[in-house]
Image (cartoon, rainbow, N blue to C red):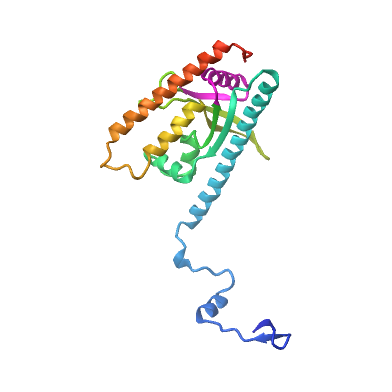
Amino acid sequence: MKICYNYRIKKWATMPVKVSKAMRNNELRGPTAIDTDIIPSDSEHVFAQEALYQEAMMRYHCAILEMRTKLEVLSKDMTVRYRRNPIEFIESRLKKPSSIARKLKKMGLEVTVDNMTQHLSDIAGIRVLCAYIDDIYEIARMLARQKDVRIITVKDYIKVPKDNGYRSYHLIVEIPVYFSDKVRPVRCEIQIRTIGMDFWASVDHQLRYKKTIGADKDIEAIEAELLKCAQTVSETDCHMEEIKDMIGDFEKI
C-alpha cells in the first residue's frame, strides 16, 4: 500500500501499489541484491583501479596548486620589487584520461595506474606566458634556485625549435607535496613561452587537428605556411626584445 494525499477529499489516504514479478523477486532477494549478469567478473579490480586513479589524480592536482603558488609568489615579488612583472599569465591543466591511455599505448604499455604514475611526467601541466624571451630563461633560473624544486629534464625548443616551427621552454620538475599522512614527490611539466609562441602553438593545434583536413587537402602546403608563420612570430619576438633594450627603461630582474 502507498500513502498519498487525496486532493479531492483533502485527506491522506492509502492506495494499492502494483508489484511486478521482477520487483517481487528483488524483494525476496533482499535490498542489496544485484543482477550479476551485468557486473563484470573482474569488477573488484575495476573498482580498485578507479579508486587508485582518483587518488593519483588528486596528487597531481595538489602538485599543480603547489607549483602555481610558487609562480604566483614570484609574480607578486617581482611586481613589488621591480618596475615590471615578466609573468603575464599562468595556465594549468590535468591530462585527460583518454590522453593518458593513448600515450601509454603508444609507449607499448598497459593502461594501469602504476604505469601512469611511473612512466608519464606530464599529467600535471602548467604553462607560463611571458612578454620577452629573456624572461623565459630568468623564470626557469628562479625555479631552479628553489631547494625543493628538483629539475628532472629540460627541453629548450626556443634555441632548437621542432621541425614544424614549435618553440617553447619545457621543464619536468619534481616537488614535495604535503598530505595528511606523508610527503610525496610529484612530477609536473612546466612550459614557459612568450605570448607570441603561445598564440602560434594554439592556432597551429586548431588547424593541424581539424577533422576537415583530409586527403583532398594539400597538407604539405599547409605545413609550409604554418612554418612561415612560426618564423614570423620568432622574428617578432626578437624584434620586441630589441625594442625593449633600445628603450632601456626596465630594471633588470
Q: Quadrant of the N terminus?
A: bottom right
What span is colored magenta in the figure?
130-155
Residue at 48% x, 30% y is 198
Quadrant assignment, res 106: top left
| Count of residue discs | 0
- Percent coordinates x, y for residue 219 in the rendering: 29, 35
Residue at 67% x, 23% y is 79
Residue at 56% x, 84% y is 18
Give left or right: position of 216 versus 62: left
Quadrant assignment, res 15: bottom right
The residue nearer to you, when weighing 39 against 202, is 202
Q: Looking at the image, can residue 107 be seen?
A: no
* Vertical placement of residue 5 versus 141, above or below: below
- Percent coordinates x, y for residue 160 in the rendering: 41, 20
User: Most extreme residue toward the bottom, as rendered?
Assistant: 9
* Vertical placement of residue 41 versus 95, above or below: below
Residue at 47% x, 27% y is 197
Q: Quadrant of the C terminus?
A: top right
* Vertical placement of residue 6 versus 182, above or below: below
Q: Looking at the image, can residue 140 be seen?
A: yes
- Percent coordinates x, y for residue 48 in the rendering: 53, 51
Does 142 appear in magenta? yes
Give left or right: position of 252 versus 5: left
User: Most extreme residue toward the right, as rendered?
Assistant: 11
The residue nearer to you, when weighing 80 against 168, is 80
* Vertical placement of residue 105 versus 195, above or below: below
Does 68 appear in magenta? no
The residue nearer to you, when weighing 238 against 33, is 238
